[in-house]
Image (spheres, grey):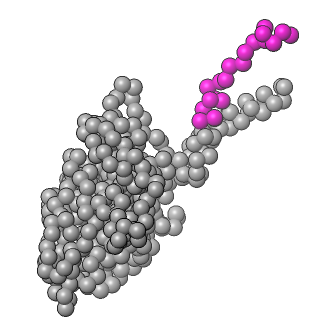
Amino acid sequence: MNKDLKPKSKKSKQQKKFKALSKQLSTGTRSSRAISIAKGTNVGNPAFFKALTDPFNPESLGCQVPDPFPFPTETFHVHQTSVLGTVGTATTAAVLILPNPLTSLVDITHINNLLVPGVQCVSSTSMTPYGTTFAAPSSAIYGAISQSNLNLNMSTYRVVSWGVKISSLQPQLSATGRYFVSYLPCGDTMPTGQDIALATNPGIVSPMVSMNSASLNSSIILECPTAFEFTAADLMRGDIQLAGMYTNSNYWTFKSTIGAGASGANFMGDDVSVTVANLVTSSYKDAYRCVGGCGIALFAEGLPAGAANQIQIETIYHLEGTPNFTGGSSNSTLVPSVGRVTNVGTQNNVDVAMIAASALKNTVKFLKEGAQFLNDNKQEMASVGRQIGNMFMGS
């Protein structure tokens, strides 16, 4: 038969769906529903919008803020995991995750128990306590990275996007508990190292999210407009991914990584404190560290008592900064040769992407396990498999 007269085969809907499913499965062991953008919807800068809504996606690595900042910048990311559990007869755990890697994780359980050693819900973490030379409250605050490590690479920095992933570590057949999550807008003040050292224990969180740590429980969290609840059974079927939520574009103001300098100096931009004979002489107090962003409160109840490994908290921060050229004479300083040309755009691009990305439907995702994904689609997969088999047998 003349090939020009041969009827063209049309792909069935099942075949197309099978191809889409196969592509989704090939990306990894877990699959997720991509954030859909309705036709005609303005999201400002699509790449920036994707980084805001899907921070754990590898395509978000290297993202920049498309604002008018004209200078070349370098990009980095900080990816950490922490494990939560219970101690003694306790069956609850509470943490606050902040939108800045220097004070990333706050152990609310430890604060509410008056910082008694060993009475905390953070069982293990790759982060380090904030300001280890300070008094007790600093032991409840963990940084995903230190100011000194930031300063090794950048003189100024900003967080482009960030997110949290919540996973269960409980045995599948005996998993128990309920989880309550809410976004909490950050205030315009972050505590200094001296504040942390002298603050009353439950009050240490108040400047961060304008809420006392004792209020971060199931009944209060559920009153928040962005709150939702899920169970241990839900986490058996997959993970909960939370992208950062933003209230204004001041969040993307550049912050300094320079230390406090000489003893007694006190600068607004400090990310570190200077101590002399264990007394705080100057400390960090930067209103712009978290302003414009939201913290994420997690409270869990009904967990097994005295079980250390219950929940995994995964955090990621995408950082953009200007290179640090300090280090003595000019001929002893390595100058980065791969600094990226900044993603220059208009402030309107940032604002539009921020507004679209901060909608609750675009911040919370349920990541299904591969096995569950296959189980949900087994009938369609079997149907497509039979059709493919028939095609081969008929050829």
Indicate whether residue 351 is drawn in magenta: no
Relative vertical location of residue 69 with respect to residue 146 in this rendering, above or below: above
Horizontal side of 53 relative to 67 (left or right) equals right
Q: Which residues are magenta?
A: 1-20
Which residue is rendered at x = 39% and y = 79% of the image? Answer: 306
Q: Nearer the viewer, residue 110 or 306?
A: 110
Residue 272 location, quadrant: bottom left
Outermost residue, bottom direction?
277
Relative vertical location of residue 293 with respect to residue 151 in this rendering, above or below: above
Residue 191 can be seen in this image: no
* Residue 82 screen position, x and y as percent: 41, 69
Which residue is rendered at x = 25% and y = 36% of the image? Answer: 348
Q: Quadrant of the N terminus?
A: top right
Residue 10 location, quadrant: top right
Residue 205 location, quadrant: bottom left
Q: Nearer the viewer, residue 18 or 358?
A: 358
Horizontal side of 385 relative to 211 (left or right) equals right
* Residue 112 screen position, x and y as percent: 22, 75
Q: Nearer the viewer, residue 9 or 48?
A: 48
Q: Quadrant of the C terminus?
A: top right
Q: Nearer the viewer, residue 228 or 339?
A: 339
